[in-house]
Each structure stands twice: as C-alpha cells, then as structure tokens.
C-alpha cells in the first residue's frame, strides 16, 4: 500500500485509488498504534521522510472516494504534526471543506475564508491555488483568470499555474492566449512531451478556426506538426503524439495546393515556416506505421505494450480504419 501512496492519487486510475482508500482505516489504525507507544509521536523512529507524503496522498484518495471520515483523520494527523498554521495543511483543510460542502452557499463561505486568509498572508500559495480552483468550480472563469495572472506575477516560474491558465483561456475560446501560456510552461519544463502534444492540439484547433485566414492556417498547422514531432522525439511510444501527428499531417496535406505555391513564392534566402509536402507525407506515413504497431501489439497483449488506456487504443484504431476507407475510395 505504501508504494502506491507515494504516487499522487491524481496520477492513479480510479480502481487503484478505490483500492487504496478501502485500506485507509486499517493503515490509520496501525499507524495510530505505533504512535501511541512513543511519548513524542512525531519524533518516533517509525517516522520516515515518506510518512507524511503517504498521509497526504491517502487523504486525497479518500476524498476521491467520499471516505470523509478517513480523510478527516488524515488531516488531524497532519495538523498534529505540522500545526494548523502550516500553509500546506491549510490548503488540505480547505480541500476537505470544499469536498464536504453541501451547497453553493457553503462554497461561497469557504471562498470568503480564503480571501480573508490571503489578506492576512498573501504568500499562502496553497490557499491562493484553492481559491482559484474554487472560483473555477463556481463557474467564475474571468475571476479565476484574474486571480491566476496575479499569482503568476508573484510566481512566474509556476508551471502548474501557467498550464491551468492555458486551460482557462481555452475554455473561454481565447486560443492565442492559451497557446502563449503553454509556451511559458515549456520555458520552465522544456522536456514535457505531454505539454508539447497539448500545444500541438491547440495549434491544430486554431488552424481549423474559421477566424483564421488560409495563410496563417497553414503556418499554424505546420507549427502543430512540429509540436507533435517534438513530443514523440521525447517519448518514442507516446500514442497521443502519433495520433496528433497523423491528424495534423492529413489536414496539412489536404491544403497542399496552396502550400507549394507559398513555398515557391518565398524570396530567396527567406526562411518559411511551412513544411515541404514531401516531409509532411513522410511524417504521415511514419505516424500511421507507429500507430498500427501500437494498436496491434497492445491488442495482442505483448509485454511492454500495455500502458495505454482502452479509449486511446479504440480512437487510434478508428483513425486508422477511417484512413483505410478513404484510401480505398
């Protein structure tokens, strides 16, 4: 159980989280017995560097499965160890309060409490982030964006906050701002292949937007292809990257009549952001081959090819089947 709880619950599938939370009462009872044998529990030899990480992850797992009793006990242990004024403990307490809130009025009261705490201590980052998350859950995206931008003024290297801001901008249809925010994420974590893939998706969506003209659309699609290429360069078996690369190259090749003309009309010595058609065709063929291999080996149950979600495999198979039907027409 301890090994599973060293991973953040948000990264675990629901079945694993449920299994861990079901064992929470036993774990908490055993740890309570060990602590009671020491005069100063938090100085006992049984405590390790991982002990309190486990308590925090166990609390989050219990919240996901609505085991409020165990979650409260985890919070109680953390409070006894680190104090009620600890910023991280305050953030976890707020998360618990939000989870057990019965209606919107209670959530609004929690929001007021967050604002009061931040007036007294603007440096309380966990509470600031809980306030932003609560604003979003209350369907107040504009206020959430304002709060996030204020937070990023103080903490410009918070990659998680930039990613959240990008998602908020996207939810409001502000694709340019969303792309910019994800580019800021890559300045902080340049090797995050999932972020490169998400940026490729945003460029793909922006290229298909009716508000873009033909020239900028082709450039955005070329940027999308480059982002997907970078994602699979960093993670060789990244299905999402290959899926996006195939979609983007297909779309790029569909509008190839104007692309060759744009490339040939470029002034000598002037660099073009567009991709040559031959390169796009090779990338499309490579993505098709790799997707076929992933689907085939995963379906066959081969060792080392089972780390994909079922929905991803189904989507990849449908894309390949659709491509086959088009080529036969």
Image (cartoon, helix red, strand yellow):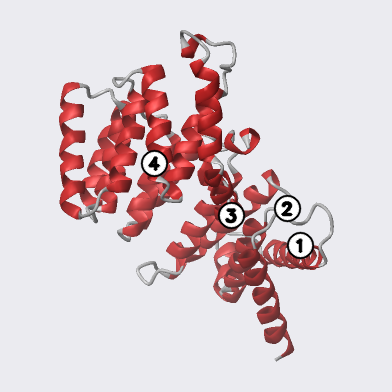
Q: Is residue 286 left or right of residue 196?
A: right
Mark nearest the camera among 3 and 1 is 3
Q: Which callout, 3 or 2, points at the residue further toward the start of the chain?
A: 3
Tell which of 166 and 132 is nearer to you.
132
Secondary-structure class at tag 3: helix
Q: Could you tell me which quadrant the C terminus lies in?
A: bottom right
Q: Residue 263, image x and y in percent?
A: 59, 62
Q: Is residue 148 visible?
A: no
Q: Is residue 270 above or below residue 94?
A: below
Name the residue carrying label 2. 237
Q: Which callout, 3 or 4, points at the residue further toward the start of the chain?
A: 3
Q: Residues under labels 4 and 2: Cα distance?
A: 41 Å
Q: Residue 107, image x and y in percent?
A: 21, 47
Q: Which mark is residue 294?
A: 1
Q: Which mark is residue 69?
A: 4
Query: In the picture, residue 328 is in which quadrant?
Result: bottom right
Secondary-structure class at tag 2: loop
Secondary-structure class at tag 1: helix
Q: Which callout, 4 or 2, points at the residue further toward the start of the chain?
A: 4
Mark nearest the camera among 3 and 2 is 3
Q: Is residue 269 left or right of residue 202?
A: right
Q: Which callout, 3 or 1, points at the residue further toward the start of the chain?
A: 3
Mark nearest the camera among 3 and 4 is 4
Can you name the residue that lies furthest to the bottom here?
329
Name the residue at 70% across, 75% down.
320
Name the residue carrying label 3. 15
- The reply to whether discs 2 and 1 touch (Cβ–Cβ < 8 Å) is yes
């Amino acid at each position: 159980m301890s090994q599973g709880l060293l991973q953040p619950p948000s990264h675990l599938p629901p079945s694993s989280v449920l299994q861990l939370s079901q064992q929470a009462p036993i774990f908490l009872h055993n740890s309570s017995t060990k602590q009671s044998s020491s005069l100063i529990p938090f100085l006992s030899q049984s405590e390790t560097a991982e002990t309190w990480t486990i308590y925090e992850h166990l609390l989050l797992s219990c919240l996901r499965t609505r085991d409020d009793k165990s979650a409260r006990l985890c919070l109680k242990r953390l409070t006894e160890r680190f104090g009620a004024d600890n910023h991280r403990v305050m953030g976890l307490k707020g998360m618990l309060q939000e989870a057990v809130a019965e209606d919107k009025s209670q959530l609004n009261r929690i929001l007021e409490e967050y604002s009061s705490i931040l007036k007294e201590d603007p440096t309380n980052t966990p509470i600031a982030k809980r306030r932003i998350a609560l604003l979003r859950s209350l369907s107040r995206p504009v206020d959430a964006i304002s709060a996030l931008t204020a937070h990023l003024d103080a903490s410009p290297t918070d990659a998680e906050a930039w990613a959240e801001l990008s998602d908020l901008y996207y939810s409001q249809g502000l694709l340019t701002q969303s792309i910019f925010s994800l580019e800021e994420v890559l300045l902080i974590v340049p090797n995050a292949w999932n972020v490169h893939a998400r940026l490729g998706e945003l460029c793909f969506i922006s290229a298909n937007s009716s508000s873009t003209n033909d020239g900028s659309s082709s450039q955005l699609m070329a940027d999308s292809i480059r982002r997907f290429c970078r994602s699979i360069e960093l993670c060789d078996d990244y299905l999402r990257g290959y899926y996006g690369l195939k979609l983007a190259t297909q779309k790029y090749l569909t509008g190839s009549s104007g692309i060759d003309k744009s490339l040939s009309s470029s002034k000598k010595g002037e660099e073009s952001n567009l991709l040559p058609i031959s390169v796009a065709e090779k990338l499309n063929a490579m993505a098709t081959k790799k997707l076929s291999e992933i689907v085939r080996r995963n379906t066959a149950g081969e060792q080392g090819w089972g780390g994909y979600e079922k929905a991803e495999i189904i989507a990849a198979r449908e894309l390949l089947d659709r491509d086959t039907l088009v080529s036969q027409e």
